[in-house]
Image: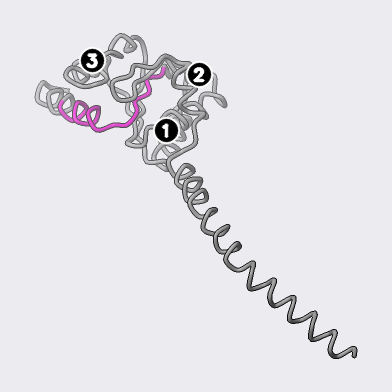
Amino acid sequence: MDRAEKREFVTELNETFKVSGAIVVARYAGLTVAQMNDLRSKMRAQGGTVKVAKNRLAQIALQGTDAEKISELFQGQTLIAYSADPIAAPKVANDFAKGNDKLVILGGAMGTTALDAEGVKALAALPSLDELRGKLLGMIQTPATRIAAVVAAPAAQLARVFGAYAKKDEAA
């Protein structure tokens, strides 16, 4: 990389850090190319991205962002996973790390909050944005179905009473 490419990369990474919901920093020493491609494809499927960047360039790109506190995590062979959804990147990285011990999560950031490895795992345990939307929609719809049942109940009771009188008259 020449200087112009480095400047462009740092600027691009800086903008990415500013708009990301969550950033995960992990050590990837020992991962094969196939495993790395698998991680990238899983992350891409969830709306995230995995990048390997030189530590010094990543530290420079972090300057002026909310995640500036995590610059000390960039030592050794590190990769950056990020997504706009604050749950997607930590969840995919954590799930991949469970199945592959060569990926070690070092920490990350969510907004202005710096996270250690346990914080990233706790964030990964939360439900995704789509799951939360589904639960919220279910909670909103539940009272509506209860109201419909309460409103329909008197009519159903009247229908049963009329039916009982009709059977009584037929029997007589």
Q: Quadrant of residue 22?
A: top left
In the rendered structure, which amino acid carries the disc numbered 3?
Answer: Gln
Q: Considering only vertical position in the picture, is 41 above or below 106?
A: below
Residues under labels 3 and 1: Cα distance? Answer: 23 Å
Q: Which mark is residue 59?
A: 3
Q: Amino acid at mark 1?
A: Ile
Dot in front, 3 or 1: 1
Of circles 2 and 1, the one toward us is 1
Tag shown at residue 9: none
Give the class, few, some or many, for how many residues have Cα within 10 Å of label 2's Cα (few <14, many ≥20): some
- Along the viewing direction, whichever of 147 and 108 lies nearer the viewer: 147
Please tell me whether mark 3 sits on a helix, a strand or a loop: helix
**Residue in front for this viewpoint, 73 or 167:** 167
Q: Decide: marks 2, 3 in contact (CB < 8 A)?
A: no
User: Quick one: label 1, few (<14), some, or many (20+) residues within 10 Å?
Assistant: many
**Position of residue 66 measured from the top left corner of the image (x, y, whole percent):** 24, 21
Which quadrant would residue 81 be assigned to in this image?
top left
Residue at the image position 70 percent from the left and 71 percent from the top: 157
Tell me which label, 3 or 1, sits earlier in the chain. Answer: 3
Q: Residue at x 54, y 53 (%)?
A: 142
Residue 87 is marked as: 1
State how far apart marks 2 and 3 are (Cα).
23 Å
Range of residues picked out in magenta = 11-26
Tell me the quadrant of the picture where the N terminus can be found: top left
Q: Tell me which residue sits at (39%, 17%) in the image.
A: 115
Q: Which mark is residue 102?
A: 2
N-terminal-most mark, 2 or 3 = 3
- Mark 2–mark 1 Cα distance, whole angstroms, equals 22 Å
